[in-house]
Image (cartoon, grey):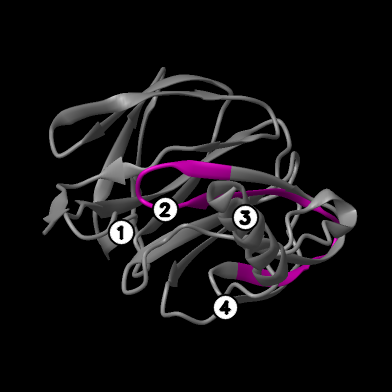
Amino acid sequence: MKISLLTALFGIMYALSVHCSCAGGLPAVSGNTSYVKGALADGGDMLVFDGIKMHAFTLPPGGFEIPHTVTEGLYGVVFITKDGFRPETVPFAADGAPVEAGEISLRRMGDTGMGIITGVVYKPVRGGKLRRHNGIGRLFKGERITINGAVTYSAVSDERGVFMMELPVGEYGLVFGNKTAGNVTISQGKTAIRNIRKGTVLAD
């Protein structure tokens, strides 16, 4: 009886502290500050990268509030994509307050016969004895990524650690720091996301 009573009390407390309104099919984040909020003019897809995993959401037109799993004091990255449009790549700092993404309106690709690759060059933070850490400890600017296909291209990360390039449709190999960094397929009108890891920080 004591166990069932405690279980019931826990269920009541949980229901009072976290609730879901799920408007538009999106998860609600009421009572939680670990989320990204903003507005997307025509809808699209959002991917939130916490340095470990990519979390995907489909956004209808209008306002959004999307939860993230980045540990306070670390960085995460938001990717917003839509076929035929140039993506928005937005790094953010998790500081205990909601992340304000603002009003976002994606621009159409200059040549829809091409595709796009984007990503960040990053150093993740992992582990933790007292609590699990998810996040990016550092984003690197000025890093060159070589993209090998029928023609060789190169992209350089900007001051935010972000790189982006339009490419002809096809298969490519990525090289970073003279080492193979994986492969990517570029499809017509679509965005491929490839994040490049540069080292790892292990948390205590």
Q: Position of residue 79 (x, y in %)?
A: 57, 53
Residue annotated with mark 1: 136
Nearest the camera: 2 or 53? 2
Provide the residue span drawn in magenta. Answer: 36-55
Marks 2 and 4 sit apart, C-alpha to C-alpha, by 15 Å
Looking at the image, do the residues carrying marks 2 and 4 touch, with CB atoms under 8 Å apart? no
The residue that appears at 51% across and 82% down in the rendered structure is 97
**Amino acid under disc 4:** Pro
Left or right placement of residue 155 versus residue 41 in this view:
left
Disc 4 crowd, CA 10 A, few/some/many (<14, 14-19, 20+): some
Marks 2 and 3 sit apart, C-alpha to C-alpha, by 38 Å
What label does residue 5 carry, if any? 3
**Is residue 199 highlighted in magenta?**
no
Residue annotated with mark 2: 50
Looking at the image, do the residues carrying marks 3 and 4 touch, with CB atoms under 8 Å apart? no
The earlier-in-sequence mark between 2 and 1 is 2
Marks 3 and 4 sit apart, C-alpha to C-alpha, by 35 Å
Looking at the image, do the residues carrying marks 2 and 3 touch, with CB atoms under 8 Å apart? no
